[in-house]
Image (spheres, helix red, strand yellow):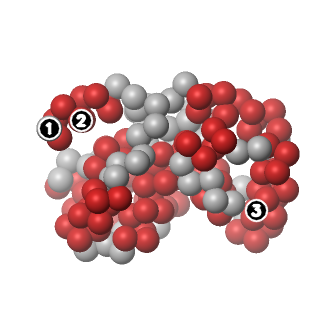
Amino acid sequence: MKILMFFFCFSLLSAGYHLEDISDILDIKVETIELLKESDIKTTDQFLLENQTSRMRVDFSKKFKLSLEKVQYWTSLCDLMRINGIGPTTAMLFYQVNIRSISKLKKAEIKELLPKLEEANKIYKFTPFIPDEGQIQSWKERAERVDVVLK
């Protein structure tokens, strides 16, 4: 069953980021990266496939001795980073304004989202430039073409 789910979902995902390359940004410890590699979880897409449902996230957190909060956070970021042009820092910015999945991005009202992004970035200083209305619209359009993976 898991193998079938993997092949079905793999076609829905981008190539993803190597977790090792973004571990500093996402605050993933080297030891955790090594444990994930041993389980053949090396990319954001592989991480997302292992954590699609609430139950899977709970089991994953227990298996790897990680806080459920951290697993949920990383899963949200991995989902958002499937959109071409959304990298780790932009995903973290979206997370802070409660856009924690592609589904939520699809539903977001740009005019309401922009001031929230500006305020969050003043506090967290994720990026030197806030995405503008056109960029967010482009990401929303791309999100419409990406299948929902998180449940």
Name the image quarter holding the N terminus: top left
On the image, numbered disc 3 is attached to which residue? 121
What residue is drawn where x is 66% and y is 34%? 139
Q: Which residue is mark 2?
A: 5
* Marks 1 and 3, how far apart at CA: 42 Å
Check contact, mark 1 vs mark 3: CB within 8 A: no
- Say if mark 1 contacts mark 2, CB within 8 Å: yes
Residue identifier under label 1: 1
Residue 87 on image: x %, y % = 58, 45
Establish if 18 lies above or below 118: above
Nearest to N terminus: mark 3 or mark 2: 2
Which picture quadrant has residue 128? bottom right
Residue beneath the point at 24% across and 35% down: 6
Q: Residue at x 63, y 38 (%)?
A: 106
Of residues 149 and 20, the one nearer the viewer is 149
Q: Residues within 10 Å of mark 3 (few under 14, many from 20)?
A: many
- How packed mark 1 is, by other alpha carbons closer than 10 Å (few <14, some 14-19, many 20 or more), is few
Vertical side of 78 occupied by 7: above or below: above
| In the foreground, 100 or 123 | 100
